[in-house]
């Protein structure tokens, strides 16, 4: 293999890249936390030494991308890869262009040059495909699914998202430090209504913070059913008077239907006497707000990229540790037993035991009610029928998966 600058790929490049990723925070630290040392044993052999048993590491290594060793030391680090395309132009926040990588080892992609344009507005992205200004768009808003499915010029592709959307309540701050308040908010929400009203019916209620496709999902956990009478009683018992104000933070351009979901949550909580002010922010403002600990109540989504619930357990629900565990824990949660279960699952080399430990950890986290699962939205992309598309699992718009539809009738 060769990089797009022509240099051969060596084990030294992989070692330098993984070490840089760990030291410079290029990936979530806990993804590579099990690594103790990395070194090249020759041009094509790489040794990764772990601190102990680390069965999940192989599925997490994909988070540590490989660059030329010489590039890793530069600032800024140049975008040099080994894929079918190389970066030709980039205007941050606006657009970027790729062109064929002459050194790519596999079959050359169908298109010599591909331009991606950043269009934050959901409906404008769809309109660009419909009027021919673009050939494909992702993150189609749920309200447009039915209309697009009837269009002859385009193809709508949809499937369940592997990301669950949920509410986060700061356990260490009032009023959410009171378990009665957390339970009341959980019982006030009608997940079926959330799907119908915020996602136009294109999703399903979530019973837990990982979907059925993720290892650790517990089929015995059920979707919380609304009980607004009990929710009102719990709020009264906790001393929250009708009209109590809360601020709910979230994004308006990160998840499918996120802004509509925030508004619907606020509408439903008003029915139990809570006056919720929604602050829907651009994702560039929302995530720094959360990471700085300046949000007590917010909407978040999580995708377990390794296919295991250990991702969310280690990053979001584990207490914060110097080794990277709990890197995204802004919940105020520190449960030693939950930590123990998550850590035991991470080092277990027996699949059945590992799955059982993950289920027990998720069930324990569920009982805290600091993360309230809401919905599993359907995701969708729209593509011109002039293109053939080998659809990937996550509907990522990678140009190498596309080709002119006219080529389908020819021998390949």
Image (cartoon, grey):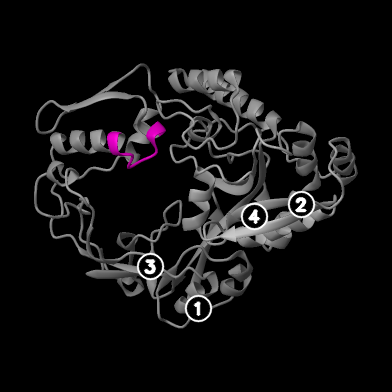
242 sits to left or right of 211:
right
Q: Secondary structure at mark 3?
A: strand
Q: Which residue is mark 2?
A: 245
Gap in Å between the C-alphas at discs 4 and 1?
23 Å
User: Residues at badges 2 and 3 in contact (C-beta under 8 Å)?
Assistant: no
User: Residues at badges 4 and 1 in contact (C-beta under 8 Å)?
Assistant: no
Gap in Å between the C-alphas at discs 1 and 2?
38 Å
Q: Specify the segment rendered in magenta.
A: 23-30
Gap in Å between the C-alphas at discs 4 and 3?
26 Å
Q: Which residue is mark 1?
A: 127
Q: Secondary structure at mark 4?
A: strand
| Residue 161 in the image, given as x and y percentages of width and height | 55, 51
Q: Which residue is mark 4?
A: 203
Q: Which residue is mark 3?
A: 388
Judge the density around disc 2: few (<14), some (14-19), many (≥20) Cα neighbours within 10 Å: some
* Membership of 318 in magenta stretch: no
Q: Which residue is painted at 54% across and 22% down in the image?
A: 339
User: Residues at badges 1 and 2 in contact (C-beta under 8 Å)?
Assistant: no
Q: Secondary structure at mark 1?
A: helix
- Tell me which numbered mark, 2 or 4, is placed earlier along the sequence: 4
- Tell me which numbered mark, 1 or 2, is placed earlier along the sequence: 1
Foreground of the two, 157 or 25: 25
Gap in Å between the C-alphas at discs 2 and 3?
51 Å
* Membership of 29 in magenta stretch: yes
Judge the density around disc 4: few (<14), some (14-19), many (≥20) Cα neighbours within 10 Å: many
User: Mark 4 against mark 3, which lies toward the viewer?
Assistant: 4
């Amino acid at each position: 293999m060769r990089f797009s600058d022509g240099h051969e790929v060596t084990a030294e490049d992989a070692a330098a890249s993984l070490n840089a990723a760990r030291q410079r925070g290029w990936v979530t630290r806990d993804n590579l936390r099990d690594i103790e040392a990395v070194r090249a044993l020759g041009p094509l052999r790489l040794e990764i030494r772990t601190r102990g048993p680390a069965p999940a590491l192989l599925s997490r290594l994909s988070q540590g991308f490989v660059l030329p060793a010489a590039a890793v030391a530069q600032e800024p680090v140049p975008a040099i890869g080994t894929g079918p395309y190389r970066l030709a132009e980039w205007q941050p926040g606006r657009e970027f262009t790729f062109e064929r990588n002459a050194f790519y080892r596999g079959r050359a992609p169908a298109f010599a040059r591909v331009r991606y344009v950043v269009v934050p507005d959901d409906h404008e992205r769809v309109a660009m495909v419909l009027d021919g200004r673009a050939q494909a768009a992702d993150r189609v808003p749920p309200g447009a699914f039915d209309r697009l499915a009837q269009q002859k010029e385009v193809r709508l592709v949809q499937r369940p998202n592997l990301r669950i959307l949920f509410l986060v309540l700061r356990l260490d701050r009032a009023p959410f430090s009171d378990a009665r308040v957390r339970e009341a908010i959980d019982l006030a929400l009608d997940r079926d209504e959330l799907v119908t009203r915020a996602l136009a019916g294109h999703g399903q209620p979530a019973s837990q913070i990982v979907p059925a496709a993720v290892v650790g999902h517990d089929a015995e956990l059920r979707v919380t059913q609304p009980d607004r009478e009990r929710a009102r009683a719990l709020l009264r018992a906790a001393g929250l008077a009708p009209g109590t104000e809360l601020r709910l933070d979230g994004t308006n351009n990160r998840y499918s239907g996120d802004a509509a979901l925030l508004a619907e949550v606020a509408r439903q909580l008003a029915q139990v006497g809570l006056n919720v002010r929604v602050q829907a922010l651009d994702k560039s403002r929302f995530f720094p707000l959360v990471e700085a600990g300046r949000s007590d109540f917010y909407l978040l989504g999580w995708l377990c990229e390794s296919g295991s619930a250990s991702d969310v357990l280690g990053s979001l629900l584990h207490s914060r540790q110097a080794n990277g565990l709990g890197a995204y824990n802004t919940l105020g949660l520190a449960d030693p037993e939950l930590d123990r279960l998550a850590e035991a699952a991470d080092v277990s080399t027996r699949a059945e035991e590992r799955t059982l430990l993950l289920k027990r950890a998720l069930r324990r986290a569920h009982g805290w009610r600091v993360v309230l699962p809401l919905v599993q939205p359907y995701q969708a992309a729209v593509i011109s029928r002039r293109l053939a598309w080998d659809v990937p699992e996550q509907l990522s718009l990678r140009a190498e998966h596309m080709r002119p539809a006219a080529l389908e009738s020819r021998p390949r």
